[in-house]
Image (tube, rainbow, N blue to C red):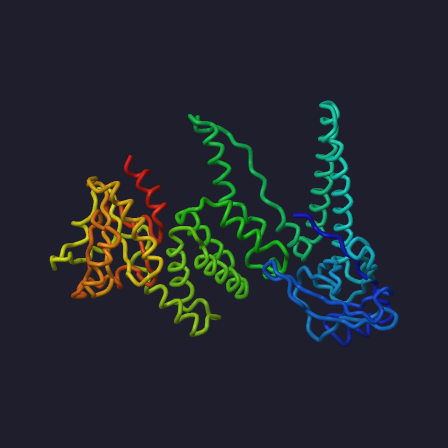
């Protein structure tokens, strides 16, 4: 991620002792071109920008952001209503001056009185210059001969080395400062060289696995998730989501333990614990990946319902308890409960006895449900393809108690290839054992009656059948 360039103005040294005595942060702004204008100070939090303060400049374009409470260390933004802006790193020194040039607000940022902020502003200008050089080299590379490309590549690598050296020098100078936190967080750990110590039969596959396992275990190494300052950067939310959505294999068995490890790494600080636990919980709710219900239950029980999430109010806990109660008995990987269901003649049989030898599809529906009316005929056509195949059976459960409605619905959609059942005596408690809070609801069980798919549509079921019934 590239940093932007910004401009800061210098505080008058004579007034700084007075400001320091009367406030915990005082940022004097000198911007003659902005006289009588309003300047805003915003802060980043989980990748989003929020207003922190505003300042009306006087006739000379001078004013002071000040308050009797220190600002949290992090990356801030000075911006105008016009959209012009400059990012401003604020560390532990919070009495300083900045000077703004609105023509090149970011590039000409100048700071006095806060060495860490000034050094970062200088680094941003350095980075912009190197990026400009790189762009020029890339333009030349497109039209260069093969011999010229070798030289240009060397020059581009040299630029990259210069940037890395600059970053490392700042990290060494401020190992515990906001500059160090910010720059380390941008760095992805370097993949170590692969060595074939096991005499791998498929080298390419082994290299790919080596790469995956390294980044799975080390991608977030440079982020101290118990340091609240890392959450006041513009990139943190994107980094966390990239890890969950792209670095990890997109299956629940890969994501869940890694997501829980993220939460554990944040527990050195109450605030960071809250941030990461909430982030993972929200991720589990919004994720479209099958099996993320398992993550919601795990996080909910381990941290929220256990009382560790002291910030959670009664409404959140009540809603979470309700949701977990709906889904915790029918999670992916669990053994499906063997419920009894009745055919149209009143004969009850257990689910296991009605299933296929390899796949059992459990389909819950209501005729009044619009999505059920769309899905059922598609499922009925799919069932006809496997009508005589004992390896797969589709058990379609009518959820209500109106037999006439049920019979008419089955006839209308030609559901003869399905195993059609209901529970008029309400003895199965299917609503307890399976999440049927939304319809239609489809589960797929394997030969051992374990749930390995849920909340799927018919096209997904077709792919599963083709894969499993080879």
Which residue occupies 52% across, 48% down? Answer: 243
Q: Does 206 sit above or below residue 377?
A: above
Image side of residue 23 versus residue 340, left or right = right
Q: Does 156 sit above or below residue 223?
A: above
Which residue occupies 37% across, 60% down? Answer: 297
Q: Does 217 sit above or below residue 58?
A: above
Q: Position of residue 394 (x, y in %)?
A: 24, 49
Exactly how many numbered labels are in the figure? 0
Q: Position of residue 418 (x, y in %)?
A: 22, 49
For the C terminus, the image quarter is top left
Q: Nearer the viewer, residue 58 or 425?
A: 425
| Residue 234, image quadrant | bottom right
| Residue 396, image quadrant | bottom left
Q: Does 39 sit above or below residue 103?
A: below
Image side of residue 234 versus residue 64, left or right = left
Which residue occupies 28% across, 61% down? Answer: 366
Q: Position of residue 114 (x, y in %)?
A: 77, 61
Q: Position of residue 66 (x, y in %)?
A: 75, 72
Image side of residue 81 versus residue 436, left or right = right
Image side of residue 464 versus residue 53, left or right = left
Which residue occupies 70% across, 70% down? Answer: 53
């Amino acid at each position: 991620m590239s940093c932007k360039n910004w401009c800061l103005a210098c505080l008058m040294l004579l007034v700084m002792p007075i400001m320091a005595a009367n406030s915990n942060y005082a940022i004097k702004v000198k911007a003659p071109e902005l006289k009588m204008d309003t300047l805003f100070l915003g802060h980043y939090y989980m990748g989003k920008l929020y207003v922190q303060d505003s300042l009306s400049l006087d006739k000379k374009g001078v004013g002071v952001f000040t308050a009797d409470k220190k600002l949290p260390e992090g990356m801030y933004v000075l911006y105008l209503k016009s959209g012009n802006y400059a990012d401003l790193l604020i560390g532990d020194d919070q009495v300083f001056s900045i000077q703004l040039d609105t023509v090149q607000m970011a590039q000409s940022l100048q700071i006095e009185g806060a060495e860490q902020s000034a050094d970062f502003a200088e680094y941003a200008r350095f980075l912009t210059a190197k990026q400009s050089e790189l762009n020029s080299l890339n333009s030349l590379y497109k039209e260069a001969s093969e011999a010229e490309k070798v030289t240009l590549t060397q020059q581009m690598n040299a630029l990259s080395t210069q940037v890395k050296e600059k970053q490392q020098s700042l990290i060494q100078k401020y190992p515990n400062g906001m500059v160090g936190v910010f720059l380390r967080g941008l760095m992805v750990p370097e993949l170590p060289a692969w060595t074939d110590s096991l005499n791998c039969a498929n080298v390419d596959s082994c290299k790919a696995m080596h790469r995956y396992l390294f980044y799975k275990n080390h991608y977030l190494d440079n982020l101290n998730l118990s340091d609240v300052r890392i959450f006041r950067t513009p990139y943190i939310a994107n980094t966390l989501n990239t890890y969950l959505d792209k670095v990890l294999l997109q299956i629940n068995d890969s994501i869940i333990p890694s997501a829980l490890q993220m939460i554990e790494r944040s527990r050195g600080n109450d605030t960071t614990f809250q941030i990461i636990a909430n982030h993972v919980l929200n991720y589990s709710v919004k994720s479209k990946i099958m099996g993320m219900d398992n993550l919601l239950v795990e996080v909910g029980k381990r941290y929220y319902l256990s009382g560790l999430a002291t910030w959670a109010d009664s409404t959140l806990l009540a809603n979470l308890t309700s949701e977990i109660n709906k889904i915790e008995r029918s999670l992916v990987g669990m053994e499906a409960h063997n419920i009894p269901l009745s055919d149209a003649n009143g004969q009850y049989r257990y689910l296991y006895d009605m299933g296929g030898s390899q796949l059992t599809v459990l389909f819950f529906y209501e005729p009044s449900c619009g999505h059920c009316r769309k899905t059922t005929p598609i499922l009925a056509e799919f069932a006809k393809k496997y009508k005589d195949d004992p390896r797969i059976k589709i058990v379609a459960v009518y959820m209500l108690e109106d037999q006439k409605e049920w019979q008419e619905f089955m006839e209308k959609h030609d559901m003869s290839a399905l195993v059609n059942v209901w529970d008029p005596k309400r003895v199965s408690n299917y609503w307890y054992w399976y999440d049927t809070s939304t319809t239609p609801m489809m589960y797929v069980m394997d030969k051992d009656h374990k749930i390995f798919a849920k909340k799927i549509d018919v096209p997904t079921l077709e792919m599963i059948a083709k894969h499993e019934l080879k």
